[in-house]
Structure formats: structure tokens, C-alpha cells
Image (tube, rainbow, N blue to C red):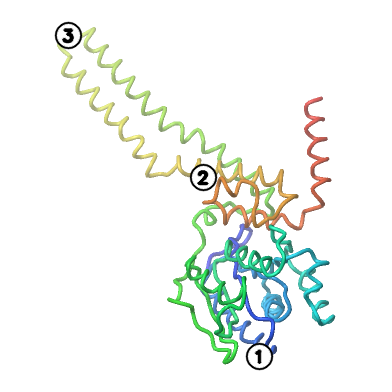
């Protein structure tokens, strides 16, 4: 494991799907808790549980995450008022409300479909972000759209490592080959320590600014040495006609040094580091200005910078607790811009 003191830890999602009807809920919850530990042993970073809050297994999963010290993200198939209609037991609905209220983030999945299509959308949303999946399955084929068996098959198609708990025996196994240990994304290893996303942005921005001259130096230095070699050769030829060979040799030496500069720069990775720092700083700048509306699971710029999806989601979820409402954020931004223009 990495020393993560003061650094942004990469979020790893463990998704869940299971059945509503359970023979022994207490035993099923114990099995889920055991499997969460098995999954936690296969990833580095901060493990976060993500699922719906439907009656039955979903609530057991959310409880098990909380007891294991894991944050949770809850995906609702409908608005909370409509979702309540899917609960027959008032106590179970209160249980679901507690899970929603204690979640790190709770959202209604997009689409606005009716059941069962809405539950299908929730399952797809989990699969979109999941690094691991956990299932409680009775071994039966799906009885409709969005069933557990269907989600298991899609997890296999997406090559998401999954633990499947047999709902009858409560024994679990990896669905397919056991995954290799997933270490932290190298881009997270290289992040400066910061107490907040704002501080991280400032440090990345400053590091990118410092790195830009170093990166440009290699490109400009290589071209300048080539020009210098030509000038020196011309001077030697102009003022000492017998020095043509010496001029050619001098040019060869200088041009060779110029040719080595890009190679040295590449080995030092200054150009790559500068580009990476600048891109991440600009992504955070955009996120800080626009994180209020929308879902942190689909943060701004995700479609354009899909390769930085883990970084964007991790940073966006850290900003959830700072949300005050997008209207307030909009007004403050507009006032700041207008005041700045007036100034």
C-alpha cells in the first residue's frame, strides 16, 4: 500500500446487485461483509460502495459498507417520492432513507424510465464506474430487464472482476479468473500533497508553470545549437580558408549535442510531466468552476478526457461536501466576473 498522507487517494468503486427476497438476511449481510474485505485486498486506493437502495440485498450491502468504514454512492431509479412506492414495508423504507441520507452522494439515474427499465439504468450506471462488482445471486436466469443474472453477464462482457455470493449457500467465488492486484494509477502517485482540491489545483498549476521553461529549453536549445553550428562554421570558413575541415568538424560536434538534447529531455520526462501537470491543473480549474450542477460520476470534461476519468471522478466526489446549490455558485461566479470586468 502507498503512503497516502495528505494526498488525493484514487477512488475505486465496488458495485453491487442482489435480490430483494432473502432467506436469512443476517447471514447474507455477514457474507457481504466478508466479500467486501476480499475485494478490498485486491485494490489500492479508497474503496467506495455503489448501488441502489432497493429493498432486500441492496440495503444489506450499504449497511455492510458503512460498518466496514466505506463511503457509499446511492443510485436511485426514480425520484425519492416515486421510489417510496416500491416499498411495502414502512420500516424498510425508513431503512432505505437512512442509507440515502448517510451516503456520500445520492442521485437519480438519468433517463426517467419506468420500472423495470429504470433499474436496468441503475445497473448500467454502476457498471460504468465499477472497478469490482459484488453479487448476491440465486443462480436463476433473470426474470426481467435489469435482473441480477443479466448484470452478472454484462460485468463479464466488460471484464470487471466480480465476486458472486451464492444466495443459497452464501459461498462466494470470483466470476472467472481471480483478478491481479490493482495498484494506484501512476498519475495519482505523482500528485503533490494537498489538504483540499483547491490546494491541489494551486500546486499543480504552480508546478506546471515552473516546468514549462524547462520543457521549452530543450526544444529551443536544440534549434539554437543547430543555428550556432552553422554560424561558427561560416565564421571559420570566412576568416581562415584553411579551416574548412575544422569548421565541418566543429559543426558535427555542435549538431550532435543539439541532437542529444531532445533525447535527454525525453529521458528526464520534463515535457511529459509538464503536459500532465498542465492538463490536470486545467481539469481541476474547470471542475472547481462547474462542480455544483450535475453528477460527480459524470463530471465536466469527462467525455473529452475519458483517460482521466478516475482522476476527474475522484476530485469531483471530494467536492461534494462543498456544494451549496448551483444557483448560488452561478450568481457568485457572475458577480465575480462582472466585478472583475468593471475593475
| Rendered image quadrant of residue 249 | top left
Give the SS element for disc 3.
helix
- Residue drawn at (28%, 16%) of the image: 232
In the rendered image, residue 191, in percent from the top left (x then y), is placed at 56, 52
Q: Which residue is mark 2?
A: 276
The residue carrying pointer 2 sits among few (fewer than 14), some (14 to 19) or many (20 or more) residues within 10 Å by Cα, namely some
| Rendered image quadrant of residue 30 | bottom right
| Rendered image quadrant of residue 8 | bottom right
Q: Which residue is mark 3?
A: 241
What is the C-alpha distance between the residues marked 2 and 3? Answer: 50 Å
Q: Which residue is mark 1?
A: 27
- Which dot, 3 or 1, sits closer to the camera? 1
What is the C-alpha distance between the residues marked 1 and 2? Answer: 47 Å
Disc sitting over residue 177 in the figure: none
Marks 3 & 1, CB-CB < 8 Å contact: no
Q: Quadrant of the C terminus?
A: top right
- In primary-sequence order, the first of circles 3 and 1 is 1
Give the SS element for disc 1.
helix
What is the C-alpha distance between the residues marked 3 and 1? Answer: 96 Å
Give the SS element for disc 2.
helix
- Which dot, 1 or 2, sits closer to the camera? 1
Front residue of this view, candidates 179 and 160: 160
In the rendered image, residue 77, in percent from the top left (x then y), is placed at 71, 66
In the rendered image, residue 37, in percent from the top left (x then y), is placed at 58, 79
- In primary-sequence order, the first of circles 1 and 2 is 1
Compared to residue 18, the image places residue 258 above or below, namely: above
- In primary-sequence order, the first of circles 2 and 3 is 3
Front residue of this view, candidates 256 and 105: 105
Front residue of this view, candidates 44 and 249: 44
In the rendered image, residue 309, in percent from the top left (x then y), is placed at 57, 54
Amino acid at each position: 500500500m502507498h503512503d497516502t498522507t495528505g494526498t488525493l487517494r484514487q477512488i475505486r468503486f465496488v458495485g453491487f446487485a442482489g435480490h430483494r427476497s432473502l432467506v436469512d438476511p443476517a447471514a447474507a449481510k455477514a457474507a457481504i461483509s466478508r466479500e467486501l474485505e476480499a475485494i478490498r485486498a485486491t485494490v489500492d486506493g479508497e474503496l467506495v460502495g455503489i448501488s441502489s437502495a432497493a429493498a432486500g440485498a441492496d440495503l444489506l450491502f450499504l449497511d455492510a459498507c458503512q460498518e466496514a468504514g466505506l463511503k457509499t454512492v446511492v443510485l436511485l431509479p426514480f425520484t425519492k417520492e416515486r421510489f417510496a412506492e416500491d416499498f411495502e414495508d414502512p420500516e424498510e423504507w425508513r431503512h432505505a432513507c437512512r442509507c440515502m441520507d448517510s451516503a456520500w452522494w445520492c442521485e437519480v439515474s438519468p433517463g426517467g424510465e419506468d420500472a423495470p427499465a429504470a433499474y436496468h439504468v441503475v445497473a448500467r450506471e454502476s457498471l460504468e464506474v465499477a472497478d469490482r462488482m459484488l453479487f448476491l445471486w440465486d443462480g436463476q436466469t433473470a426474470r426481467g430487464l435489469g435482473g441480477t443474472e443479466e448484470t452478472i453477464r454484462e460485468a463479464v462482457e466488460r471484464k470487471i472482476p466480480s465476486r458472486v455470493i451464492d444466495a443459497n449457500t452464501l459461498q462466494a467465488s470470483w466470476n472467472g479468473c481471480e483478478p491481479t492486484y490493482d495498484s494506484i494509477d501512476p498519475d495519482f502517485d505523482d500528485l503533490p500533497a494537498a489538504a483540499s482540491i483547491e490546494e491541489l489545483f494551486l500546486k499543480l498549476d504552480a508546478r506546471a508553470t515552473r516546468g514549462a521553461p524547462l520543457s521549452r529549453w530543450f526544444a529551443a536549445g536544440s534549434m539554437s545549437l543547430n543555428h550556432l553550428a552553422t554560424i561558427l562554421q561560416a565564421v571559420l570558413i570566412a576568416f581562415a580558408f584553411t579551416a574548412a575541415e575544422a569548421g565541418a568538424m566543429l559543426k558535427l560536434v555542435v549538431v550532435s549535442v543539439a541532437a542529444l538534447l531532445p533525447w535527454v529531455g525525453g529521458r528526464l520526462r520534463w515535457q511529459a510531466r509538464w503536459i500532465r501537470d498542465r492538463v490536470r491543473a486545467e481539469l481541476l480549474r474547470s471542475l472547481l468552476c462547474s462542480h455544483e450542477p450535475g453528477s460527480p460520476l459524470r463530471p465536466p470534461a469527462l467525455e473529452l478526457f475519458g483517460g482521466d476519468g478516475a482522476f476527474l471522478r475522484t476530485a469531483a466526489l471530494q467536492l461534494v461536501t462543498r456544494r451549496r446549490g448551483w444557483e448560488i455558485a452561478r450568481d457568485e461566479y457572475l458577480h465575480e466576473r462582472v466585478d472583475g470586468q468593471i475593475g
